[in-house]
Image: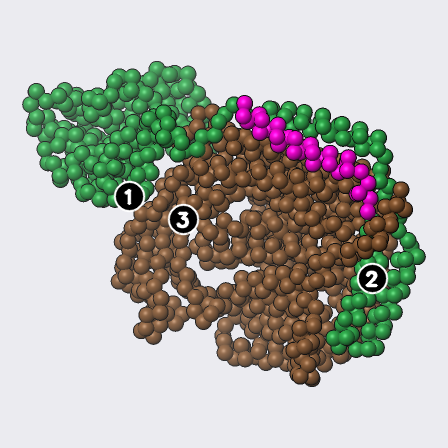
Chain colours: A brown, B green
Amino acid sequence: MIVEVGHYALVLALALALVQSVLPIWGVKAADARLMAVARPVAWGQFGFVAISFAALTWAHVASDFSVANVFENSHSQKPMIYKISGVWGNHEGSMLLWVSILALFGAMVAWFGRNLPKTLLAAVLGVQAWVAVAFYLFVLLTSNPFARILRAPMEGRDLNPILQDPGLAIHPPLLYLGYVGFSIAFSFAVAALIEGRIDAAWARWVRPWTLAAWVFLTLGIAMGSYWAYYELGWGGWWFWDPVENASLMPWLAGTALLHSSIVMEKRDALKVWTILLAILTFSLSLLGTFLVRSGVLTSVHAFATDPARGVFILGILVLFVGGSLTLFAARAGALTKGGLFAPISREGALVFNNLFLTAACAAVFIGTLYPLLLEATTGGKISVGAPFFEMTFGPLMVPLLLVMPIGPFLAWKRGDLLAVAQRLAVVFVVAILGTIATWWATRGGPILAPFGIGLGLWLSLGALAEIAFRIKLFSEPSVAFRRAVGLPRSAWGAMLGHLGVGLLIFGVVAEGAWKVEHVLVMKPGETVQVARFDLTLTEEKTIVGPNYDATVAHFVVREKGREVAVLEPAKRNYRTRKMPTTETAIATFDGFSQLYLAMGESQGGGVAMRIYWKPMVLLIWLGCLVMAIGGAVSLTDRRLRIGAPKPSRVASAALPAAAE
Amino acid sequence: MFIWALFAGLTAVAVVIVLAPLVRGRRGAAATEDGDLAVYRDQLSELDRDREAGLVPEAEAEAARAEISRRLLRAARRGEPGEAAAGSNRLARVVAVLAVVVIPVFSVGGYLMIGRPDLPDAPLARRLAGAEGQSIEALVARVEAHLAANPEDARGWEVVAPVYMRLGRMDDAAKAWTTAIRIAGPSERRNIGLGEALVAAGDGAIGPEAQAAFRGALAAEPKAVLPRMYLAAALSQEGKKDEAVAAWKALVASGTDADPWMGVAREELAKAEAVAAGKAVTPLATPEAATPPGPTAAEVQAAGQMSAADRSKMIGDMVARLDERLKSSGGTIEEWERLVRAYRVMGRTAEADDAIARARTALAADPAATARLDALAAQK
């Protein structure tokens, strides 16, 4: 009964989404306040019903109700509780239910925080939001129904894919979807502005916090996914330029550009049309990512062709929304008021520079991801576009962007003074150069480009810190610096943290890429191997029985200069139900950010194959992302962003209805 | 019926959510301050705060103030589109009636097309406690749960292993026996169980792992007959004709006519001698020269426990599994030949012909295989 109530609630949510997609927009067109007023309560109701539905599916997973096909295919009665819950979204149907749940959540949040929005804009935004929702409810109910039942329920399920039975993967999809779906708000705002035919400075103000929130979640989601791939897959890499990863990177790049262009729009009343276009593109790329991951097109274009229902449906959604919104954009963009012009050397100029390079980098990733698919679909030829392509295209596009990044925040709006900025950044520049030289000297004979990478990292992180230091006059008037620091808007702190995070990320990427040590060998118990400055001894190999797997564990003792510093136990698990092996890596952190990484391979000839890596500074990669996300969150708490508009004064709200009659 | 009451309640909530703002009248028409003006006023006050905090120099602040004021004036001059009217009562009424009708019809109609209101929930705990808990699958599930909690219970593994065999879950059976042997050590019963599970999982092939298991059984109980029969059959499978004859001879010599297995052993000895002498063996008795008596030897033991119907089902299952595997992941010419012969032996000639046709497609690139298939088709 609980299951069927959840199923019915999902149909009801669709019904409410249909209402929400028609009445408010009709109200906008007919200038009817009552129809527009339907939008907010319906948005809440829609979320309420999806929440019931999601709770019902969660219950079915927790109670191992194998009469639900989704539970049977992805759960197992012996699975630990946390994975019974995360298994709800660890499969196609459940993850799409999570998708629509988050979409409804964002709709409800817009309805809640948007009390002060102009009524027509709010109605139009929620209406557009409901169009997206309707499309995805239909997708879930018609092609991917998580509530499909089995008449004669089996006694045991098929278990969740073992590599998904991991805490990282329990939170990665929700974070990623909060990011993907969060951009739908920016999209809805953009389309609503196009429908209304007007766009004002207030628009950017309301869009920015939503974009920022989505960006923070997406940043965390991508970082989480990357760290998961690093420790769970056992290949030692942290980014593989895999289409699934690129699918999340593209909206992130576009979203980062959107975040910056909306600043120009808010502050300078310029770049309006471009910002609208970016908002549309960002969400379009989110939809594209959903299509790539959910249609099965990645496994093989041909597999997609043989079971096309889902893929064609999402492709339809993609074409409808991307095509529809871009057509609307083409038709209405001319009618929107353009912003003013500005000098190239100015804050706006720097932000345009940022936008140009970010979108170009995004296009490079787009081509590298989609070209092989297109080629396979049209000619049947299979090519693989791997890291070299992206290093040749994405890398060079990023370098100028990063070089200019510390300069941007120093430039004044409208007309910047490059010479003054150069004077302020001279010290940072000299330190970065010295850092490059010192690194070169310390690692003579190593990779040639690595010292420049370290210099770039110094330039970025010190540049970010210097900007704040100058703003609070840390060196010129230290006595008032603290008071100034407190008075500084949080968005300034957020920007600093965001840019600092990029600097840390660069340190991690460069150090890991250039100075990692890798050993692949077969070891027998009692043997010792030296990796970097450590001696690793394999003491024994043992078997362990887990709740739903059996594991072979290698016991390692790590010594540094004869002193024991760590015990590591990499393992190979064999999950009983799916008969799938997984690699459990063992990782120890040294010096704060560097890691010793052990992954176990097959046993062979009385020994066991081991992959042992020393990864200097590798943690900075994810720490940098975390700092970026914290920067976004700090910026989000900026009071000026949180309050959409001042509360209407009592006089106005009492007087105006009468006037409106 | 209770479920329909719940549905009705949920539907009522949905309808009320839509109706409320429609009938609530004009409250929705409250105006907010024009968006642009609000932003610019905010910017002005922010500028003032910054100046008081000493964050912007006086001159810069003045310039910024002038700029914002200019925009403020421009926005004020542009004016706002008129505030929306409260809306006509008639329109609201029409929409309200539509909502009352359309939402329930749409949701119930839509749900009935895809939902199963007649199916109750089936949480595992409740099913195990109820009548369904007595079915063989439920018992297996319960033993599995017990073993997951007490993985070192050898007795549990021994109990569940033969049940797996009967359910056709050969790999699970083999694993259960392996675990039992790991915990309680080798014994005749456990090792034979493991060996037979491995043979069954390998479609009758007595591989090195299975042979090791049977040898383990002999080590535990040197007088055991079954392991020796399997090992002898394994020699034939490996093409060691003379050694196979010797093994069968030794076996026959060790028993008396009173032993129930003696008949089978003699038959196998005769076959092995015929093979060693290079005579053609009738395909009906041994489906394939390369893998002859495997299933036959298994039958010796199976005969005691299984009815004829069960036995033919077991063979049918094995063939079906082989077919499935070849269909999904392809295979060698030998495997295809084995499948075709098996179908012929079972009298299912149509399926045998079908298998040949599929094999031709699958192995089209290999001329040698095609030739063998032609020969096979001609044998009919």
Quadrant where the N terminus of chain B sits is: top right
Would you name the residue on which mark 2 appears? B40
Examine the rendering and report whether any part of residue A254 can be seen.
Answer: no
Q: Nearer the viewer, mark 1 or mark 3?
A: 1
Asked if labels 2 and 3 share a chain, the reply is no
Q: Contact (CB < 8 A) between labels 2 and 3?
A: no
Q: Toward the viewer: B198 or A126?
A: A126
Mark 1 falls within which chain? B
Residue drawn at point x = 60 percent, y = 63 percent: A630
Would you name the residue on which mark 3 appears? A582
Label 3: how many Cα within 10 Å (few below 14, some 14–19, many 20+): many
Q: What secondary structure is the stretch in magenta mostly built from?
A: helix
- Taking the image as shown, residue A587 lies to the left or right of residue A227, namely left
Q: CA distance from mark 2 to mark 1?
A: 70 Å
Element carrying mark 1? loop
Q: Which residues are magenta?
A: B1-30
Mark 3 falls within which chain? A
Counting residues from the start of the chain, the first of labels 2 and 1 encountered is 2
Q: Is residue B16 magenta?
A: yes
Would you name the residue on which mark 1 appears? B151
Q: Amino acid at mark 1?
A: Pro
Q: Position of residue A593 (x, y in %)?
A: 48, 68
Whether residue A604 is situated above or below residue B150 in the rendered picture: below
Q: Position of residue B299 (x, y in %)?
A: 23, 23
Element carrying mark 2? helix
Q: Toward the viewer: A541 or A108?
A: A108
Residue drawn at point x = 88 percent, y = 45 percent: A658
Q: Contact (CB < 8 A) between labels 1 and 3?
A: no
Label 2: how many Cα within 10 Å (few below 14, some 14–19, many 20+): many
Q: Amino acid at mark 2?
A: Tyr
Asked if labels 2 and 1 share a chain, the reply is yes
